[in-house]
Image (spheres, rainbow, N blue to C red):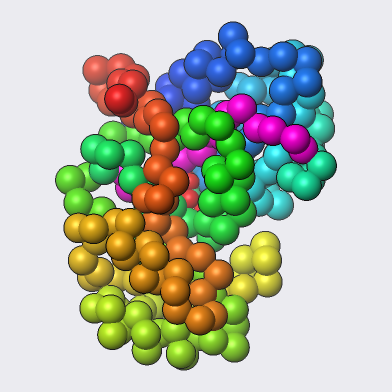
Amino acid sequence: MTQDELKKAVAKAAVDYIAPHLQSDSIVGVGTGSTANFFIDYLAELKNEFEGAVASSEATADRLKGHGIPVYDLNSVAEIEFYVDGADESNERLELIKGGGAALTREKIVAAVAKTFVCIADESKMVGVLGNFPLPVEVIPMARSHVGREIVKLGGDPVYREGVVTDNGNIIIDVHNMDISRPIHIEEQLNNIVGVVTNGLFARRAADLLLLGTKDGVKSIP
Ligand code: 5RP
């Protein structure tokens, strides 16, 4: 199977997982990226069975609206039962690196609100220790150099992601070669740097369920 076929398989599995729980007033939280896009396309088949969605990016909002799924501002929503999103890496504890698509801050906010965070990923994303994928950090533009220097003090190699402006008007610094053997600790240390909006470690709020696409089928973890 190709990587896209594995992504489609987990996207479909996620829709099958949440479908029995959807009610006419349900709001679904929706992530960003190619796997999330496949999820949106399958979710659209059920669009008359739930109220609408909260999007983690402008791109996701556009795709949802393109399918005729109403998109709500998070502030107007009382609760989100499920948040479904992809990841750049996951470990066995379902701690994640996210933000390859620069949507990490809104993704983290929607994940924080959701009761259940369902991560969907192909098997290439499963790792023993996080950190092979450069860790994205969203930064207020004027703090770029300061944040870079502080990241070096923490043992990482900061690389400015040229030409990328987030939906929030900020920049992304990708951190290479960071020791992420203690994900919660690193997540907190990075977030403590003045000028950091947030970073792409989802460890304090890890996923609750990982649907992993493998050549032997979709595995549910735990
Ligand atoms: C976007 C993300 C994505 O979930 C992550 O980059 C995975 O993307 P894809 O599903 O395209 O492999 O965090 O900010």
Residue at left offset 33%, top offset 39%: 94
Instruction: Kindly indicate the quadrant of the structure image that contains residue 10.
Output: top left
Magenta span covers which residues? Answer: 77-90
Left or right placement of residue 148 versus residue 1 in this view: right
Specify whether residue 126 is in view. Answer: no
Left or right placement of residue 161 versus residue 150 in this view: right
User: x%, y% of residue 189?
Assistant: 36, 71
> Where the C terminus falls, by quadrant?
top left
| Rendered view: 82 above or below 33 | above
Left or right placement of residue 28 versus residue 111 in this view: right
User: x%, y% of residue 34?
Assistant: 51, 41
The answer to whether residue 78 is magenta is yes
Instruction: Kindly indicate the quadrant of the structure image that contains residue 38.
Output: top right
User: x%, y% of residue 32?
Assistant: 57, 45
| Rendered view: 42 above or below 40 | above
Specify whether residue 49 is in view. Answer: yes
Residue at left offset 46%, top offset 90%: 146
| Rendered view: 133 above or below 6 | below
> Where the N terminus falls, by quadrant?
top left
Residue at left offset 55%, top offset 70%: 197
Residue at left offset 61%, top offset 27%: 81
